[in-house]
Amino acid sequence: MNDKIYPKPPGVCYCMNIRRASRVVTQFYDDVLKPSGLTVARLSLLRHLEMLKPTTMNELAGCVLTGLL
């Protein structure tokens, strides 16, 4: 895990704290997935494809952007 991201004391801004936590979680998953050659973003796209099959690129893009599934 990247020691530059964590641990840091929480700030007064909740938004910044949530963004920081999100980066730490994403980095954790990227580290775990590294041996497979996947990243969290790629895994997310594969999961969307699995749930939407068959679909067009435009439908996939719309679902990924809006988070609808």
Image (cartoon, helix red, strand yellow):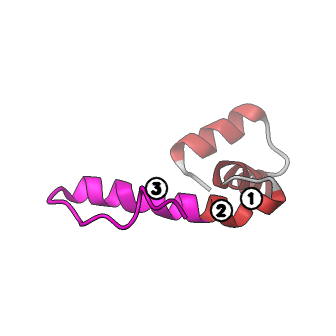
For the point 82% across and 60% down, which residue is it? 36
Q: Is residue 11 left or right of residue 67?
A: left
Q: CA distance from mark 2 to mark 1?
A: 5 Å
> Where is residue 22 shown, x and y percent of the image?
44, 59
> Where is residue 3 shown, x and y percent of the image?
46, 62
* Amino acid type indicated by mark 1: Lys
Which residue is nearer to you in this view: 42 or 36? 36
For the point 80% across and 53% down, which residue is it? 37
Q: Which mark is residue 34?
A: 1
* Amino acid type indicated by mark 2: Asp
Q: Is residue 26 left or right of residue 10?
A: right
Instruction: Name the quadrant of the C terminus.
Output: bottom right
> Can you tell which quarter of the image residue 17 is in?
bottom left
For the point 76% across and 53% down, which residue is it? 38
Q: Is residue 4 magenta?
A: yes
Q: Which mark is residue 31?
A: 2
Q: CA distance from mark 3 to mark 2?
A: 12 Å
Q: Where does the magenta region start and end?
A: 1-28
> Where is residue 21 shown, x and y percent of the image?
39, 62
Q: Looking at the image, tell me whether mark 3 or mark 2 is earlier in sequence order.
A: 3
Label 1, secondary structure: give it: helix
